[in-house]
Each structure stands twice: as structure tokens, then as C-alpha cells.
Image: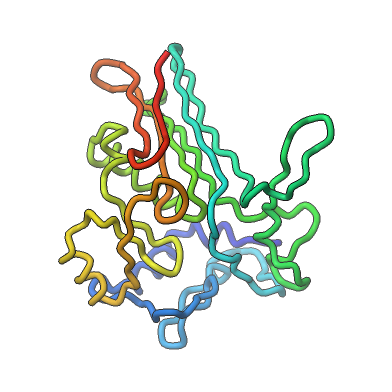
């Protein structure tokens, strides 16, 4: 399907969207879903097709369902030669599609669940289409040289948490373990998750502003936030330093 990439990446589109943000009040009606680029009757969102040179498709947009559970794994590796790997794999749910390719031992995922089974929409299942993918394995370079590798399992909540960890390292100078352990927030779905370690006064203020907040604990497995793990090259002493989700079975190993 046509996608308004130029419109989405337009600085004018970004400015117009930013102008609608009220830092004091959340434009959110509780228990109500918002389709992409549609908005509320009293707070219309800008349509990126209006900022793009391509023609708008006739089919409408259909949001995929929220994540339910997690069957994803991630590992990050940096070797002595500073080659970096960030690998995230998922079955999407349970035993995936429960189909193993004969002679390979490879289990096929059930990622087609993110498509709309009914024809006629942008997200209808069809050949050569690519489904939603929220896995976010990340390799970060500093001055063109390897710096750190990070990723996480955790369904829809992978993306926000990885952005949070990357910001902690780059913007706040944290080490990898500190960046991962820091209390997190996540607004990937209907509720905004806030770590239970965050000041209750902050939680109350966000609720008063209209955010649909939910205080959750870091999970050992499944639910809640995603669970990052990563490795970075210490910029001071060039030593490899790992960080893992501290509330579950994750681990870091050197060799």
C-alpha cells in the first residue's frame, strides 16, 4: 500500500503536530481508541497525505490489535574485535504458528495475526505485504565507531523502552546497567505505564493532566514493560560492560 513517507518525515508536518500539544493537558479521552491520523472530533489530527506528493490510497487505515503476552528473545554481543550483534527473534505468541519447516527445526511465527483478515483495508492480509514489527534491535556508533548494542523482548512495549535506554546512555551519560535499571515509563498502548518506583506525586499529577496512567512493577517474565539487555564499550577505559533486566532470569557473560 502507498505510505506517505515524505509527509511523515516533513518538518512542516512535525511542526503542525507539535503545535497541537498542550504540555499541561493530555488530549486523551479514556477508554477510547484512536485510529491513525483521524483524531477526535474536537482535536483533529493532521493528515500526512496532505504533506506528501503521492496520491492518497482509497482503502482506509486499520490499527492492529494491542500486544497480548510475549514470546520474544533478544541477545546482544560485542567481541574482542568490537564486532557488534543485536538479535531479536519472536514466535509472536506461544509456539508461533505451531508449524515447523520440515528438516530444519525452524518454527514459523504467527506474525500474520497483525493483519486484518477482511479485504479492503490498508492492513488487509495480502501477498508481498509486510506486517507490523515492533522488534527494535539497535546498534549505536559513536564518531563512526562501535559504541553499544541493545534490544529487548516485550511486544509493543519494546520500542518505547529501547528509546528510553538509548536516551539514558547518550543524553544522561549512564552506563548500560544503570540505563536499563532506571525507572521507566511507557505510552505504547491505551494505558501509560509508570514504574512503581516513580514518585507518587508525579503519578498523581499526570493523572490530573488527563493521562490514563497505570502504576506497574517491573515484571520477572511477561507483561508490564519490555526487558532490555545490552553491551557497551566504555568510552573511558575501552572495557566491555553489559547490562540486563535486573528483575528476571536475564544474565550477562564475559569470555
Indicate left or right for 209 with 119 as reference: left
From the top left corner, tell me how far across and down residue 164 is, in percent: 34, 47
Coloring scheme used? rainbow
**Number of dots carrying numbers:** 0
From the top left corner, tell me how far across and down residue 181 is, in percent: 29, 41
* Residue at (40, 46) in percent of width and height: 220
* Residue at (26, 73) in percent of width and height: 207
* Residue at (43, 31) in percent of width and height: 149
Most foreground residue, 32 or 12: 32
Most foreground residue, 91 or 147: 91
In the depicted structure, whether residue 191 falls above or below residue 197: below
From the top left corner, tell me how far across and down residue 128 is, in percent: 77, 52
> Residue 204 lies in what quarter of the image?
bottom left
Indicate left or right for 96 with 8 as reference: right
In the depicted structure, whether residue 69 falls above or below residue 153: below
In the depicted structure, whether residue 236 falls above or below residue 140: above
Q: Quadrant of the C terminus?
A: top left
> Residue 116 lies in what quarter of the image?
bottom right
Q: State the residue lying farthest toward the right.
A: 102
In the depicted structure, whether residue 220 falls above or below residue 3: above
Indicate left or right for 143 with 105 as reference: left
Q: Quadrant of the N terminus?
A: bottom right
Q: State the residue lying farthest toward the bottom.
A: 42
* Residue at (17, 59) in percent of width and height: 199
Most foreground residue, 123 or 92: 92
Indicate left or right for 200 with 145 as reference: left
Amino acid at each position: 500500500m502507498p505510505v506517505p513517507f515524505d509527509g511523515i518525515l516533513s518538518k512542516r508536518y512535525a511542526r503542525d503536530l507539535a503545535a497541537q500539544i498542550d504540555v499541561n493537558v493530555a488530549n486523551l479521552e479514556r477508554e477510547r481508541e484512536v485510529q491513525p491520523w483521524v483524531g477526535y472530533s474536537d482535536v483533529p489530527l493532521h493528515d500526512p497525505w496532505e504533506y506528501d506528493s503521492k496520491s492518497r490510497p482509497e482503502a482506509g487505515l486499520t490499527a492492529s490489535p494491542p500486544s497480548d503476552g510475549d514470546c520474544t528473545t533478544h541477545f546482544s554481543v560485542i567481541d574482542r574485535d568490537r564486532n557488534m550483534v543485536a538479535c531479536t527473534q519472536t514466535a509472536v505468541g506461544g509456539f508461533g504458528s505451531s508449524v515447523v519447516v520440515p528438516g530444519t527445526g525452524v518454527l514459523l511465527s504467527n506474525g500474520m495475526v497483525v493483519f486484518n483478515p477482511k479485504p479492503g483495508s490498508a492492513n488487509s492480509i495480502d501477498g508481498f505485504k509486510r506486517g507490523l514489527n515492533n522488534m527494535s534491535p539497535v546498534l549505536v556508533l559513536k564518531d563512526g565507531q562501535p559504541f553499544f548494542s541493545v534490544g529487548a523482548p516485550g511486544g509493543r512495549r519494546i520500542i518505547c523502552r529501547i528509546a528510553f535506554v538509548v536516551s539514558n546512555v547518550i543524553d544522561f551519560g549512564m552506563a548500560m546497567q544503570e540505563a536499563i535499571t532506571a525507572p521507566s515509563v511507557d505510552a505504547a498502548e491505551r494505558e501509560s505505564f509508570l514504574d512503581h518506583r516513580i514518585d507518587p506525586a508525579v503519578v498523581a499529577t499526570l493523572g490530573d493532566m488527563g493521562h490514563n496512567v497505570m502504576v506497574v512493577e517491573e515484571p520477572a517474565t511477561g507483561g508490564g514493560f519490555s526487558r532490555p539487555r545490552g553491551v557497551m564499550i566504555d568510552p573511558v577505559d575501552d572495557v566491555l560492560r553489559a547490562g540486563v533486566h535486573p528483575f528476571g532470569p536475564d544474565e550477562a557473560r564475559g569470555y
